[in-house]
Amino acid sequence: MTRKENPRMIKNFIFDVDGTLLDSNDYHAQAWVEAFAAYGKRIPFKKVRRCMGKGADQLLPEFLNKKEMKEMGKDLGQLSGEIFKRKYLAKVRPFPKVRALFKKIRQSGARIALASSADAEELKKYEKIARIQDLVEKSTSADDANKSKPSPDIFHAALKLLRNPKHDAVLVVGDSPVDALAAKRAKIASVGVLCGGFSKKILAGNGCRAVYKDPADLLKNVGTLLKQPQFRQTYFRAAPNQPRLEFSLILPGPDRKPGSWLQETN
C-alpha cells in the first residue's frame, strides 16, 4: 500500500534565481553602474544595489526621467546586460547546497519552477552554473512577463506552467522585497533568504512569512518548508508606518568578495 499523500503539504516551489540561488546581485549592480556611466549618468553603486530584483523596466525609471527613458532607456538596458555577460557572468557562483536543496525538494514529490527577470538564454546558463538543470521542472524568464517584479506577471506565468495549482500549495522563495511583494500580489505565500543582501526586517515587512539565511539554511529546514499550514500565518509583521516597499542592505560595498558580507541579522 502506498503512503497517502498529505493534501496539506507544499507541492510547488517557485524560486527566484539572482541573489537567491546564485551570488550574482553585486555583479548585476556593477554592470548597471558601468552602463549608466557610459551614458553620462554617475549613479552610486549602493543606490543601484538597492534595486536588485527589479528588471530593467522597473529599475531604469528609478534613475531616468521620461525624456531620458525615451532617448536611452532601451539601449542602456541592453548595454547593462552585455557588460554583465562579458565581464561578470563567468564569475557567478551558486550559494552552497543549492543542488542538495533541490534534490531534497524533488524527493518529497514537490515540483520546482524558476521565476527570473533574466532572459531565457541567461536563465539556461544559470541552471547550468547551479547544476540544477535536471531538477527544475519549469522556468519562466523576462520573456514570459509583460512587467518585471514587483508586478506578479512572472509568478502568474510560473503558475500557468505548473498547471495552475491551488495557491495554498505553492511557496515562493526569493531574496528581495520585490520578490515578496510580487508573490503577495499573486496571492502566493513567500519566504525570504538573506544571501541576496536585504535585511530580515525589509523582507518580512514586504510580505515574507519567514526568513532564512541561504539555501543551506533552507535545506536544514526543508521539512518546515513543506508543511503548508506553517505559512498560513505571518511570522514577521511590518511596523505600522513602515513603507510597503523599502530597501535596506547589509553589505559594505562593491569591493567586497562575493558572499563575504553574509551575516545573521535581527
Image: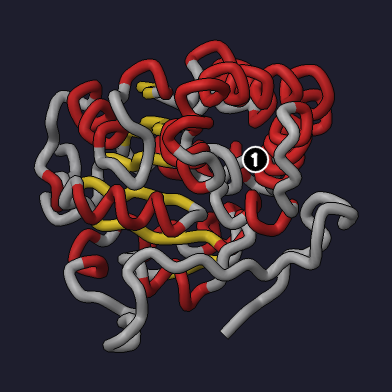
> In the image shown, does 77 or 113 lie closer to the viewer?
77
Residue in the picture at 31% in, 37% down? 109
In the rendered image, which residue does mark 1 sit on?
A: 22
- Quarter of the image holding residue 87? top right
Determine if residue 126 is in view: yes
- Quarter of the image holding residue 141? top left
Scheme by which the image is coloured: secondary structure
Residue in the picture at 62% in, 24% down? 76
> In the image shown, does 25 or 14 lie closer to the viewer?
25
Is 56 displayed left or right of 28 in the figure? Answer: left
Q: Residue furthest front?
A: 67
Quadrant assignment for the C terminus: bottom right
Amino acid on which the number 1 mark rests in the picture: Leu
Is 52 displayed left or right of 208 in the figure? Answer: right
- Quarter of the image holding residue 163? top left
Quadrant assignment for the N terminus: top left
> In the image shown, does 101 or 158 lie closer to the viewer?
158
| Residue 225 coordinates in the image, percent (x, y) | 36, 59
Q: Is residue 217 above or below residue 155?
A: below
Q: Is residue 6 above or below residue 93?
A: below
